[in-house]
Amino acid sequence: MTVAKQPSAAEDAYVPSERRRERERYKRSRARRATGLAALSTLVTGAVLFVVVVNSPGWARTKETFFSAHYARVALPQVLEGLWLNVRLLFVCGACVLVLGMLLALARTLRGPVFFPLRALATAYTDFFRGLPLIICLLMVIFGVPALRLQGVTTDPVVLGGAALVLTYAAYVAEVFRAGIESVHPSQRAAARSLGLNSRQTLRYVVLPQAVRRVVPPLLNDMVSLQKDTGLVSIGGAVDAVYAAQIIAGKDFNYTPYVVAGLLFVALTIPMTRFTDWVTARMDRRRAQGGLV
């Protein structure tokens, strides 16, 4: 009896055709050309902007007022110390915003006439705080709450400013969560109920995991905005990065500390923004491959 010879791994290995190799070489050459053109155009644009700014009539005065190396060295330690307050506010307020936003979104998606008052309250909350400017909310909470002289209520501007940030951003995050919940197809709920899950179990094990996964990119964008807006608590006297820069600028009449504070905020924001882009691209790839429902 003749035994069929099994093909070896070497014989089974895929060998691309000459046409495919040529196509890949063409794609690589196009990518290198595009990268080179982008780098060249960036260098030319940067050089033109540099020449225009440096040769402007008021550049010498602007450089001394906004880009002084001496005042940057003086301001950096104090601004960094204030920035630690902004970072702590970001983490604490971010966690509170996510929790409160999720509760509001769940309240707005409750079904049945018995839950109408809860839905109405949640809707009124989101409409009010999404329409109210953040700076006005901060002023009302930081200066209005202490004016009430309530027993046992703090007057710390950091706590009150953080509370105002949570009140405002929770309204935005609630709408993000609600959009994610409502984007889950009704067939998912029906399938879960047909398997014997009740409404609470369906929400917990089927709807929320899909909803949260879909809204991760916009949630990260809200956290980036929250990180920048933590600097607004300085209007109540909290010594954060912005207020530390304001103290030095008011004493020396030089605005370089504001530039230092702004660059530190940018240094914090860029990694978060790139992480958001990476998460978005990763989820798009998985969705295109059928990995996400």
Image: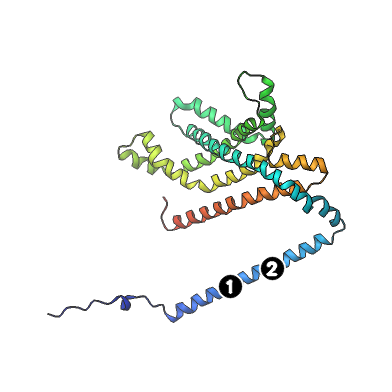
Residue 67 in view (yes/no): no
Residue name at image x 30 percent, y 37 percent: 196
Residue name at image x 49 percent, y 33 percent: 103
Q: Residues within 10 Å of mark 1 (few under 14, many from 20)?
A: few
Q: Position of residue 130 (x, y in %)?
A: 62, 36
Answer above or below: position of 272 versus 126: below
In the rendered structure, the answer to whether residue 123 lies left or right of residue 45 reads left
Quarter of the rendering occupied by the N terminus: bottom left
Q: Where on the picture, by quarter, is residue 171?
A: top right
Marks 2/1: CA distance? 14 Å
Q: Earlier in the sequence, mark 2 or mark 1?
A: 1
Picture disc at residue 41: 2
Residue receiving disc 1: 32
Q: Position of residue 244 (x, y in %)?
A: 72, 40
Answer above or below: position of 119 versus 214: above
Q: Where on the picture, by quarter, is residue 121?
A: top right
Seen from the viewer's position, the closer of residues 74 and 67 is: 74
Q: Secondary structure at mark 1?
A: helix
Residue 57 in view (yes/no): yes
Amino acid type of the residue tagged 2 in the rendering: Ser
In the rendered structure, the answer to whether residue 7 lies left or right of residue 101 reads left
Q: Where on the picture, by quarter, is residue 143?
A: top right
Residue closest to the far left: 1
In the rendered structure, the answer to whether residue 14 lies left or right of residue 108 reads left
Q: Position of residue 42 (x, y in %)?
A: 69, 65
Q: Residues within 10 Å of mark 2 (few under 14, many from 20)?
A: few
Q: Secondary structure at mark 2?
A: helix
Q: Position of residue 94 (x, y in %)?
A: 56, 39
Seen from the viewer's position, the closer of residues 145 and 195 is: 145
Amino acid type of the residue tagged 1 in the rendering: Arg
Picture disc at residue 152: none
